[in-house]
Amino acid sequence: MGEEVINILYVDDEVHNLNAFKASFRRNFNVFTAESAKDAIAILSQQEINIIITDQRMPVMTGIEFLESIIPNYPDPMRILLTGYADINAVIDAINKGQVYLYITKPWLDEELKINIERAFEVYSLRRKNKALNEQLLLVNGQLEFMLRQKLLS
């Protein structure tokens, strides 16, 4: 089985951070970048994104607000919050409201972030397989119930 390509969306209003991220990770992952929540939503509407990494401190909408806003339409991607500030309330909000898988402080360490992205993708893949198995199970149960009803009526 071939290696699956991991699609990452990195959202940050600081262009040099976007460039640094892309330079560090484009060989390992399929990297999409956005300078704002609005740009990020446009990318999400066109690409299947597995992992979203967002900066917390951005104008207009914080990282947590952005993550919270996309849950109804894009519930599946794993979420990683990056911030330069160790604000415990932001961390709590991120976990509770933005369904954040991981919280990382800036500046990130490339190797550590790479490992965390790979772990997040494993969780993403397991959740996707679990969802597919549950759907199959519901289908089989429906077929069994139908067969049982037919048997009871005959």
Image (cartoon, grey):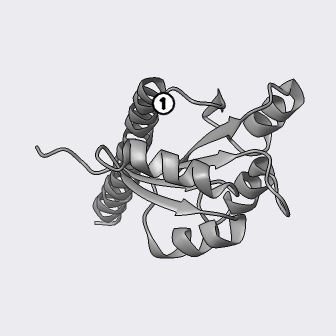
Q: Which quarter shows the C terminus?
A: bottom left
> Which residue type carries mark 1?
Leu
Label 1: which residue?
113
- Which of 127 and 42 lies nearest the eye of the viewer? 42
Q: Residues within 10 Å of mark 1 (few under 14, many from 20)?
A: some
Q: Is residue 85 above or below residue 21?
A: above
**Which residue is the extreme one toward the right?**
89
**Drawn side of residue 9 relative to residue 111, left or right:** right
Q: Residue at x 49, y 46 (%)?
A: 21
Q: From this viewpoint, which residue is outermost toward the left?
A: 1
Q: Position of residue 93 (x, y in %)?
A: 83, 37
Q: Position of residue 125 (x, y in %)?
A: 37, 42
- Residue, x 68% and y 54% (percent of image)? 14
Instruction: Confirm whether residue 40 shows in the render.
Output: yes
Front residue of 77/82: it is 82
Residue 149 coordinates in the image, percent (x, y): 37, 61
Picture quadrant where residue 66 is located: bottom right
Can see residue 51? no
Q: Nearer the viewer, residue 21 or 74?
A: 21
For the N terminus, give its image quadrant.
top left
- Classify mark 1: helix, strand or loop: helix
Q: Position of residue 23 (x, y in %)?
A: 41, 48
